[in-house]
Image (cartoon, coloured by chain):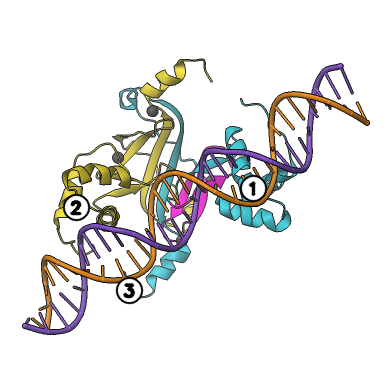
Chain colours: A yellow, B cyan, C orange, D purple
Amino acid sequence: MEKKIKMTPQRAAIMEYLDGNMSHPSADEIYTEVHKMYPMMSFATVYNTLDALKKQNMVWELSVDGDRRRYDPRTEPHDHLVCVDCRSIKDIGHNGHKCPSGDELKGYMILREHVEYFGLCPKCQRKRGMGGDG
Amino acid sequence: MEKKIKMTPQRAAIMEYLDGNMSHPSADEIYTEVHKMYPMMSFATVYNTLDALKKQNMVWELSVDGDRRRYDPRTEPHDHLVCVDCRSIKDIGHNGHKCPSGDELKGYMILREHVEYFGLCPKCQRKRGMGGDG
DNA sequence: CTTGGATTTGATAGTAATTATCCCGATTAT
DNA sequence: ATAATCGGGATAATTACTATCAAATCCAAG
Ligand SMILES: [Mn+2]
Ligand SMILES: [Mn+2]
Ligand SMILES: [Zn+2]
Ligand SMILES: [Zn+2]
């Protein structure tokens, strides 16, 4: 385990914002929201803090969204529903499945697994529904 | 199904490079390699072509690597071993697992699923092994 | 063959996420 | 107290990707 990080007002603010947050926000969203309450907060600090929290395994960095990295304060194993239209991400429980067998591993040491279901959220299904099936 | 795309020398070159390629290359790598053989090839054309191939479901665009999008000519269901150090991606067979139950779906319409195992490839395990457990 | 419309290419400019730099102030160790 | 380390903020730099658009190419019809 890495050595415990020092607590600072900025880090506390970011952690407070992330705590219980289910939206899987991007660095930009984190900055925008936290900056409202703590206007002294800088963008660089958001990235620095996320980096520190990552190393502590206090957040997951998700690469589900090809456009921007998304952050997840929930670090117990769980899976994700990702909407390919609006890019919303929803947690679902981890649907345990059999891990790859020994010789499939090709010598890899597995640290964690991610299961993502890509699809359309209810809202975007409705949006697409209007105006034909294009 | 989308209407079939027109074949052009550029597209053929890119498809030829991708065919059987197991390295899950980035757009940059595709450009660099194909450009060696076909110097008239432009970067924009690589992106254009990948876009066309995506729509035809002839390549998958993977967002496993937070730094760059990776492309996969293999479009049957299969899972991935991703090395967190060198970012190499290896195919493994799809280890069928039970899909989320009805009420977990929260109204989502699922289009496809991705399973990724993050870990260390044999080479990077060795690299880390030297010089302590840092 | 010629013409006209649609598609594709490739050069380049623009956008936006992330990283690097650098200096200052706060904290900690000696 | 002094020096060393660490964190914060401003901002520059990098880089993956997208948008634009004119020129080239393809295709079908006349
Ligand atoms: Mn989550
Ligand atoms: Mn693959
Ligand atoms: Zn949606
Ligand atoms: Zn590796």
**Image x and y of residue B91, in percent:** 52, 48
Q: Amino acid at mark 3?
A: Gly
The residue indicated by pointer 2 is A40
Mark 3, mark 2: which one is toward the viewer?
Answer: 2
Q: How far apart are the two marked residues, 3 and 1, measured between alpha carbons? A: 39 Å
Residue B88 disc label = none
Q: How far apart are the two marked residues, 2 and 1, measured between alpha carbons? A: 49 Å
- The vertical placement of A102 against B77, above or below, is below
Quadrant of the snapshot with the N terminus of chain A: bottom left
Ligand 1's quadrant is top left
Q: How many residues crowd mark 1 within 10 Å: few (<14), some (14–19), many (20+)?
A: many
Tags 3 and 1 on a common chain: yes
Helix, strand or loop at label 2? It is loop
**Image x and y of residue C10, in percent:** 68, 49
Chain under label 2?
A
Q: Is residue B110 magenta?
A: no
Chain under label 1?
B
Helix, strand or loop at label 1? It is helix
Rendered image quadrant of residue A22: top left
Q: Is residue A45 visible?
A: yes
Question: Which residue does the image show at 26% across and 43% down from the upper left?
Answer: A32
**Image x and y of residue B113, in percent:** 45, 35
Question: Which residue does the image show at 35% across and 36% down from the upper left?
Answer: A80
Q: Amino acid at mark 1?
A: Leu
Q: Quick one: label 3 or label 1, which is nearer the N terminus?
A: 1
Q: How far apart are the two marked residues, 3 and 2, measured between alpha carbons? A: 40 Å
Q: How many residues crowd mark 3 within 10 Å: few (<14), some (14–19), many (20+)?
A: few
Question: Which residue does the image show at 71% across and 47% down from the upper left?
Answer: B13
Helix, strand or loop at label 3? It is loop
The residue indicated by pointer 1 is B18
Which region is colored magenta? B67-93
- Decide which of B3, B42 is in the foreground and name it: B42
